[in-house]
Amino acid sequence: MMTQAPRSSRGEAPRDRERTTTVSLAADRRLTYAAYGPAGGTPVVFLHGTPGSRRLGELFEAAAREHGIRILAPDRPGYGRSSPWPERSVRDAERFVAPVLDDVGVDTAGLVAFSGGAPYAFAAAATRPDRIERVDVVAGAPPPEFVDETPAVQRLLRGMATTTPALLRGAFRAQAWLARRRDPSFVLAQYTTGDTAATVPERAAEMVREDFLEAVAHHRSGVVTEFGHAGSDWGVDLGEIGADVRLWHGERDTNVPISGVRRFASSLPAAELRVFDDADHLRTLLRSVPEILAEHQ
């Protein structure tokens, strides 16, 4: 039986007209998502990184149209146009995934998550196995218990999220100020190694910058909340996941070193790990998602 869709409004900004929707989750809480690809395509929910926004899904609109996939990309709470929800836990993920499915009128969908979106993808699949058909995690962070090397920047951000959250919000406000005034390589440097100009298409680089800017344009609470989650117990029973799980990772990923991902993959009997020998964090995303969408077709 189909769940009644929450109230929603569509086409809120000229840039996103006819594909951006805002759903009312509660009297004072809203969730915004964007749809890319054909309206009648196979639904796939796309969860951005930390920080990130619905705009990242636009990177794959051409692939979505080619393979008949409808990408549904929400701003998680506290990012983009979605209302802050600082008290949420990782296990609350289904409360911002299920409403998107309800709003478009589908019972089940695939789930693709990038980087810091990984915990929320696993949580949604574990708590609502009736709604998630398959989980693909790209360059995703494993649970903390599988990690033996955390990059220094990640340790700093996690520490600030728990001890000086106001300072962390201010740091991202300043970073956004700089990102607006510099070329996209300023943002890309956070996700890549080596020469980005030689291997990342110009339009893709610009979209990555736009994604970052939209992530922190209205709120910074999503950043604080999720960096706080990153180093803590997810509170998710991974044994509850009934969907197939595929992990896509690059050997050269310095944001999320692959060693912990390998240990995590070996602990999930039904999971498959696919490795790109020469890819870093962003290049893993650019190379894997078109292939993922083709498989979801």
Image: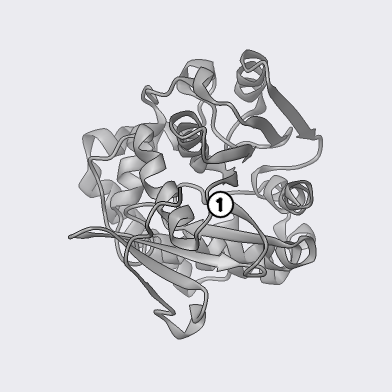
151 left or right of 166? right
Residue sitting nearer the eye, 243 or 53: 243
**Which colour scheme appears in the figure?**
one colour
| Residue at image location 28% in from the left, 51% down from the top | 221
Q: Which residue is mark 1?
A: 45
Whether residue 77 appears in this view of the structure is yes
Q: Position of residue 263 (x, y in %)?
A: 63, 16
Residue sitting nearer the eye, 295 or 198: 295
Residue sitting nearer the eye, 108 or 244: 108
Dividing the picture into quarters, in which one does residue 226 lie? top left
Q: Position of residue 86 (x, y in %)?
A: 24, 45
Q: Position of residue 92 (x, y in %)?
A: 34, 38
Q: Position of residue 175 (x, y in %)?
A: 40, 59
| Residue at image location 54% in from the left, 59% down from the top | 72
Q: Which residue is the extreme one toward the left? A: 27
Amino acid type for the residue under numbered disc 1:
Val
